[in-house]
Image: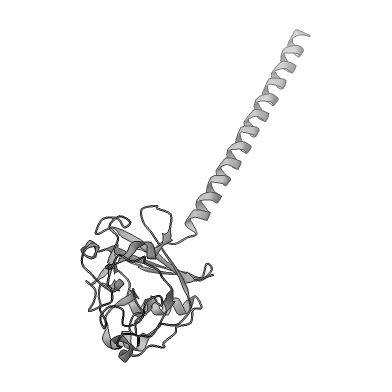
Amino acid sequence: MEKSKLSGTFVKLAVAAACAALLAFALYGCGSNSSTSSTSTASDVEMPTESNPIVVDKDKKEVRYLAEVNDIYFTEKTRHGIVYKGGSNGDKSVLTGLGDEKEFHQALLDIGLTPGNNLTADDMSAGVGEGKFIEGDKLDITIQWDGKDPFPIEQCFKTTKGEERTADWRFGGNLTRAEAKNTGCVLCLDSCAVGICSDAAWESNTTTATNYTWFNGREDVLPAGGTKVVVTFKAKA
């Protein structure tokens, strides 16, 4: 009789231990799945690298472009926002681009954007009051680095006259001239007949033709020279 009671107690303890083990395994499995899902979601966004500086995200309809801060233009004047380092103007921009501008043009086409292609070389030397404005799909352009949340890239620039820096970014196009001149221009800070993208808030003769104003990078906004940044281009909502 005593042996039977002991045997029953042992069985109950064994069952309880088995149930506890199963519950612990189930809880661990749930926690593991949750972590994997979160990691998977975060890794869905591919960021550009030096070996792959232009990322085309057709699902999100955006292009991510890798560049590097050139702090010379915190104080020196320029009209160039981003220029590919391999172009003839590769050392003349606030941000030095690491991706070829012709490939960048194709990337914008790949996400469904339409270029303006409306400016001519003559528009770049127009007199006062005769400048033209770049056309093409409107763009939303943001910048981020080192885990910082993306914010509008126009906040990174200022005029040499101290004016507020407005922006109306456009996919200007200009592929034929880009191929012929090989300047490397990705993003110009006034309307441009060569740059792939430029700013319709400023006429084509704002800088070089009339010397109305030029532009600088903002040292109080941008990180130190040499810092890698990711610039994201997409259609403006």
- Residue appearing at x 34%, y 80% in the figure: 195
Q: Residue furthest top?
A: 2
- Residue appearing at x 41%, y 77% in the figure: 200
Q: Nearer the viewer, residue 194 or 78?
A: 78
Residue 25, given in percent of the width and then of the height, sits at 60, 36
- Residue appearing at x 49%, y 75% in the figure: 111
192 in relation to 75, above or below:
below
Quarter-of-image position of residue 101: bottom left
Q: Residue furthest right?
A: 1
Q: Is residue 74 visible?
A: yes
Q: Image check: 228 left or right of 117? A: left
Q: Image check: 3 left or right of 99? A: right
Residue 131, given in percent of the width and then of the height, sits at 35, 85
108 in relation to 53, above or below:
below
Tally of marks: 0
Q: Image check: 71 left or right of 4? A: left
Q: Quadrant of the C terminus?
A: bottom right
Quarter-of-image position of residue 125: bottom left
3 in relation to 133, above or below:
above
Q: Is residue 50 visible?
A: no
Question: Which coloring applies here?
Answer: one colour
Q: Image check: 161 left or right of 175? A: left
Residue 173, given in percent of the width and then of the height, sits at 40, 83
Q: Nearer the viewer, residue 81 or 155?
A: 155
Residue 51, given in percent of the width and then of the height, sits at 32, 66
Quarter-of-image position of residue 219: bottom left
Q: Nearer the viewer, residue 123 or 62?
A: 123
Q: Quadrant of the N terminus?
A: top right
